[in-house]
Image (cartoon, rainbow, N blue to C red):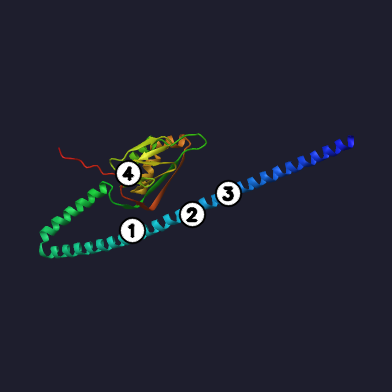
């Protein structure tokens, strides 16, 4: 009896192992199929994205080429207009000198006004002032610091000033906006680079003798100020408010 029972138990054990291995095989097959299916799906998605990106690149490339052609055409038209304008002025100078002189005077006044309004580029020597936070949770550069520096430079005779490329004009606002400082409606982040065209010696002396300079030093902010013989400050590109006549 014991032999029969032992044989029965052995067959049961062998049958159980076969079922166990068969179940493992089925599980592995299913897992393999899932992994393979997911891999195939991922590859299809990646391929679809790649094709979409390639189509976008081709579209943007075509648009850039069209825009480039338009710019070239407009530049040609502008050059022709400038040539015609020069020819008309030359004839006017010969035929009506009085009118030519008046026109020339008004043109100079307009250009001077554009310069004062910050609508033209200005280049020349001056100073470059760099200002940055002290770091590690220390002192921060505040809008009041930048405004005081601007006032010092203006009083010292700066012809044009910019902060991180933003031209400073009469209506420019320099105010804190969270971790940034907004200039002309544009959010700027430290480090701040203030460029000023004017007499380098006068500008640098006025800055280093100012109260704000002493404050910057005492606050352990990162700062630097140097003369430069080649500063280019671009025009103001923000919104120009028109003053209506009452």
Q: Secondary structure at mark 1?
A: helix
- Nearest to N terminus: mark 2 or mark 4: 2
Residue 165 shows in this picture: yes
- Marks 1 and 3, how far apart at CA: 44 Å
- Contact, CB < 8 Å: mark 1 with mark 4? no
Report how far apart the C-alphas of labels 2 and 4 lie in the structure: 44 Å
Q: Nearer the viewer, mark 3 or mark 4?
A: 3
Q: Earlier in the sequence, mark 2 or mark 1?
A: 2
Residue 50's disc is 2
**Within-10-Å neighbours for mark 1: few <14, some 14–19, many 20+:** few
Q: CA distance from mark 2 to mark 1?
A: 25 Å
Residue bearing the label numbered 1 = 67
Quarter of the figure with residue 210: top left
Asked whether 110 or 3 is in front, the reply is: 3
Q: Which residue is mark 3?
A: 37
Q: Is residue 126 above or below residue 207?
A: below
Q: Earlier in the sequence, mark 3 or mark 4?
A: 3
Measuring from the top left, give residue 103's x and y in whole percent: 15, 56
The image quarter containing residue 149 is: top left
Q: Position of 217 compared to 25: left or right?
A: left
The answer to which image quadrant residue 142 occupies is top left
**Above-or-below relation of 161 to 215:** below
Is 244 on the left-hand or right-hand side of 135?
left
Give the foreground label among 2 and 3. 3
* Mark 4, residue position: 168
Helix, strand or loop status at disc 2: helix
């Amino acid at each position: 009896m014991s032999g029969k029972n032992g044989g029965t138990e052995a067959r049961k054990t062998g049958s159980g192992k076969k079922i166990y291995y068969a179940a493992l095989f089925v599980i592995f097959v299913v897992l393999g199929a899932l992994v393979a299916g997911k891999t195939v799906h991922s590859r299809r998605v990646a391929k679809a994205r790649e094709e979409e990106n390639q189509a976008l690149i081709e579209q943007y490339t075509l648009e850039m080429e069209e825009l480039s052609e338009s710019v070239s055409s407009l530049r040609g038209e502008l050059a022709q207009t400038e040539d015609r304008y020069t020819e008309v002025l030359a004839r006017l100078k010969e035929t009506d000198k009085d009118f030519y002189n008046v026109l020339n005077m008004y043109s100079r006044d307009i250009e001077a006004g554009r310069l004062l309004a910050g609508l033209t580029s200005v280049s020349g020597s001056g100073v470059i002032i760099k200002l940055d936070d002290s770091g590690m949770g220390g002192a921060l550069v505040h809008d009041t610091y930048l405004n005081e520096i601007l006032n010092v430079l203006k009083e010292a005779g700066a012809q044009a000033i910019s902060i991180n490329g933003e031209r400073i004009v009469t209506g420019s606002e320099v105010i804190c906006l969270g971790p940034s400082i907004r200039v002309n409606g544009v959010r700027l982040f430290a480090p701040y680079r203030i460029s000023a065209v004017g007499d380098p010696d006068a500008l640098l002396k006025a800055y280093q003798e100012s109260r704000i300079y002493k404050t910057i030093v005492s606050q352990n902010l990162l700062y630097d100020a140097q003369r430069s013989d080649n500063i280019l400050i671009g025009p103001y590109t923000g919104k120009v408010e028109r003053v209506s006549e009452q």
